[in-house]
Structures are given as C-alpha cells and as structure tokens.
Amino acid sequence: MKKINLLTLFVGLCVVSSGLAQENMTSGSELTVLYLTDAHRDAVKNADERIKFVVVGEREKQFLVDPQGAFWNDYIARGRFNEESCAQTNRPFTSIAQPHVEIRGVKEGDVIEQLFHVLETPGMSRNSVSYWRGNGNDESVLVMTGNLIHADGKIANLYDLQDNFPEADIGPYHGFMARAPKLIASLEKIRALKPNTLITHLGQKIENPEQSIDTLIKRLRAVYRNYLSTSALWWYFGEKRMNASALAILGDDFDPAKLDRMPEAKKHENPDWLIGFSTTRMIRSETGNVFVMDVSGNDVADRIINMHANGDFKTVDGMFVTHYHHDHNAGVPKVAEYFSAPVYGVEPLADILERPGAYRMPCIQNITVPIVRKKDGETMRWHEFEFTFFDFPGQTLYHNALLVRKGTERPIFFIGDSFTPTGIDDYCAWNRNLLKEGKGYLYCLEKIRSLEPSPLLVNAHVDPPFELDAARLDYIERALRERMKLLADLLAVPEINFGIDHAWCRFDPFVATLPEGESISIKVIITNHFDHACKFRVEIEPDDVSSFQIMPELVQDVTLAPGKEQSIQWSIRAASERTQTGFLSAKVTADGLTGHCEAVILRDGHGEDR
C-alpha cells in the first residue's frame, strides 16, 4: 500500500482527526488531500491553500467546478419558484477549481492512490460517496461515511430524506423519507465490508458499526410505519402506490393487513350554497354574490369570470387563500383585480403571499397577493354567513383556515390541504410541520376540538366534506406523540424540531436585489425550538469578502425566549460597481446545535426581491 502523508484530511462537512488519517503513514510527502463525500458548501469553505487534490463523487464534481452553471443560475432564475424538487441549497457559491488544485470525480470501485476505496452511498444526499480502507497489519476496516450515519444510529435531520419515490411513482414533493430505501441499501453495503470503525462527517468514531447500522435501520422503519398510520396520501394515491412505498422502506416483512392505520373518516353531502371545482370553493349567498376561496391558475380564474358573464352569480365580494402553494393562489390576483375583491388572510401566511421571493419554501409562486389582514380568531359577517379566520399550521407552517357558519346548519371548516379522510398532509418535510405542544398539527387538532358544534371539514382537493370525530382526532394525536418519541431517538439534534424544520434559521429575504449605489437590509431569523431560553451565535460569511460592505460586525449574538422567533439585521452595500450576483451564508450555533442558511444578492437587472 502506498504511504501518503495527509497533512489534513477532510471528510464530508468537517475535519476528520489528522491523527487518525496519519495512522501507519510515513512522512515525506507534501500532498494535502480533501476527501468530500458530498459537494456541500460547509466542506469546501474549510479548504485552504495547502489543498492540492480534491476527491469527490463523479456526479458531485460539477458543483465544485462550476457551481453557478451546475446549480445556482437556473435555481435563482426558475427553480426556486413552483419548486417541488426540495433541492438542497447547501451548494458552493464559487468554484474551487484553481491551477494548483486537481479535482477528481470518483465512482463505485475506484481506488485512490492505492489507499482508499470508493463506495457510492446515496441516502442523506443523492450522490454521496464513502471511502474505506483496510489496515495492512490486522485487516481492520475503516469507513468514512460523511453524513450517512451519526453515532448511536442517528441521522442529522428528516428533511434531507425528501425526494422522488420511484418505487411508488411518487414525486419529490410527496416523497416523505423517499431516500430511506437508498440510505438503508448504503448502510447494508457498508455492513458487508465488516468494518471495525466508521468515521462520520463530524469526526465521530463509531466503534460498533454493526449495532449502529441495525439501530438506524430500525429507527427509520419505525418512523415511516408511524407516518403511514395517518398519511393523507392513502386518500390521494391509493393502496397500490402507498403499499409500494411501505415495502421499499419496511422490507419484505411488510404486511399491509397488519399495518395500523386510522379508520377512514365519514363523508357528508355538500351544502347547497357551496360550489366547488379544481381547488376552488365558492360560497354563494342568497343575494347572488359569492365569496371565493383558492384559485389554482388563470384558467380557473377565467372560468369564474365566465360564470359571472353567464349570470351564475352577481359579483365576487371577497376572497380567501388557504395557503401559498401554486395550486391554490396562482389565479387569485386575476379574480381579485377583475372584481375589485379584497383577499383576506392571517399572519404568518399573509406575509409569504405578499413577499414570496423572501422565502425559500416548496411550491411557492412568483406572484404577489396583497392581503387584507385579519387577526387569528377574528369574525366577520358576510350576508347570512359568519366567517371566522384562523391561523392553521397544518400542511405547512404558513396556512390558514376559514370557519363558515350559516344559521343552525352544521359549520363547515375550510382547512386547505391539512387533512383528508385518511389522515394528515404531512408528506413534505420541507413544509415546516412542527411537532411540539401548541404548534403544527397538535395545534390544529386542538383547534378542531374547540369548535362547537363539531364542524365538517373541507379539503380543497377532496370532495365531499368529511368528519373527523373524537376517536379519529385522538388517533392522530397519539400517532404524533409517538412520532415525537421516535424522532427523538432518530435525530442527532438536541430538540427534534431543529431536525424537522429546515428553516429554523433563515435569511430574510432569501433573494434580494441591491440597487446601484444603495444599501439594503437583510436579516437572519432564528426560531428557538428549545423549551428554555438560549443564546444563538450568528456568523455571516460572504462568498467574497471584497464584494460587499456589511455592517455591523459579521458575528452577532442573540438570546431568545423558548419557542420564540427573533431576527438580527445587517446593512449591505456593493463594494464596487463590478459586483454582480453575490451570496451570503450564515452559520448559527447554540447548545450543541449548528445550522446553516444562505441568501442570494442580485444587482440591478439580475432579478428582483418580491
């Protein structure tokens, strides 16, 4: 075996102990190698001028050589809107390709300098690789796994498992834990090497690989089995596709007949005053006027306008948007403008409808919807109906619901995409579905229970209305509370919501425009998911320190009360007229926790912050 003195060895996102890297290696060579399991920004920025040789998976190489062309240009221009891919944006901003640096793309079976063997190990990312070597003396095997597994059989987060689910013909937006089959296969591939030690991306040594791999696979399967018990996708996709997803993750022991699932809810007839098509619901008053909820596109807007021209109703008095997804709000501006109709909403949904470009969320639409704000729980009389507006963080954190009462009739609760007759719409881990007392679906369940008399529920994709009785509400709550325990075992974070909320730290705006000769303000917003007050440190890291003037200091501390959100603000000005598109990243640390976020700064003529 060739002996190489690795002055510094990087694996995954962080430095791996050079003491381990230099074990049984002779000195004399000045070759410094950067081994990357993924082309993540966190790893690349740790590189220094001593690096002469970079090794990365072949399919990840493009993100090191030309990150703008391989990812950022298209993502900024098109990909971030109407996005269902849930793409990881922790990509390098600038190329590390330099004359003195060789970037080698590797694939399964390659051997690097007769030292490290390459395994393709997708899982937490699509194209990750692992590196393994055997010790020539005692034949012990060491595998550097990057972010594939953490000590004690854990993973970093849940949302990086979101992806296309080919086994079940399910796209990435609905592909909850879809990378789990690949992750499990990669773990089994590593197990087959009979390793003695695994080295994680944090430099952790796992000395009991067999046990840790077993533990992680069991935990992944337990979480997915729990998810299946209350999934709305049984209603949308049916038994065949959902059983295929279950088989892919749970393995050959999966038996559909033994899967514990919430009994399907009872359906009811639509009231005679409710009109529905596409994702739109229209309430028709005895006056002939209508109130419109959700318009999926301009074709549906045209249908509403044509209905008016045909005398089906007199006018649109007002509108309501349940959430920001493109299949619910794309046609809202056209209808609102044609009828001069106000659009009502409750925070925090109102802000994302008015400033979609400031957010990085899936299925967001590049349109602005001005909102007439209502307070959570505020009531409004509309002809013979009474409306109550609610913040309703179900399918996504940014979600509203509308309770409609008419005389002595049973109330109807328009809940957007939050529930179906088979369960809850928590299939996209990028929607910020929090699991905590008074948050997310636990909050929504309590809201439904608090309404008297018990309302019928209307999902914009489900016809007819349905009823979640006390037994089903209790079933969902038990499943969610069990999942909280399962995730505490699975996720390598001090509080589970840091591992299921990709935006617990985020820039606002996500994409901003910097006018010529002016400065703009940009914030890092932090959500403290801890049950105690906590000090967070934020370190701003521009891709090129010479591109921007940033005030005040790049490192700031903030203490947040438990469960609260707070921002820190900076002022940014271009350092020269030549400055074009630029990037900022932030590292946020607190109490054994590290998070990262990024922002794109566009100059005039290169985009706009909406």
Image: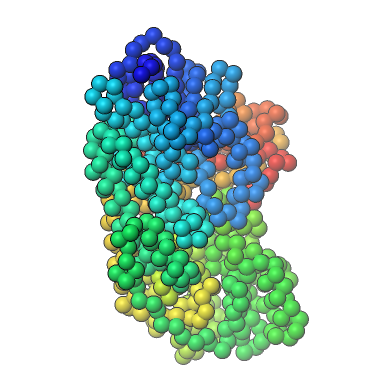
Residue 117, located in which quarter of the rendered image? Answer: top left
Count of numbered badges drawn on the protein? 0
From the top left corner, tell me how far across and down residue 17 is, in percent: 33, 25
Side of 88 relative to 485 (left or right): right
Q: From the top left corner, tell me how far across and down residue 325 is, in percent.
A: 57, 61
Q: Does residue 487 sit above or below 262 in this rendering? A: above
Residue depicted at 58% across the width and 56% down the height: 364
Q: Residue 212 location, x and y as percent? A: 26, 43
**Residue 204, image x and y in percent?**
30, 33
Q: Residue at x 65, y 49 (%)?
A: 78
| Closer to the camera in the image, 466 or 245 | 245
Is 41 positioned to the left or the right of 21 in the image? right
Q: In the current view of this chain or complex, which residue is farthest to the top? A: 28
Q: Compare residues 416 and 562 and report the one nearer the observer.
A: 416
**Residue 504 appears in view:** no
Q: Residue at x 33, y 16 (%)?
A: 25
Residue located at (49% from left, 56% from top): 166
- What color scheme is it? rainbow
Q: Quadrant of the N terminus?
A: top left
Observer-nearest residue: 56 or 533? 56
Q: State whether residue 115 is above or below residue 232.
A: above
Along the viewing direction, whichever of 483 and 517 lies nearer the viewer:
483
Tell me the quarter of the picture where residue 449 sits: bottom left
Q: Is residue 283 visible?
A: yes
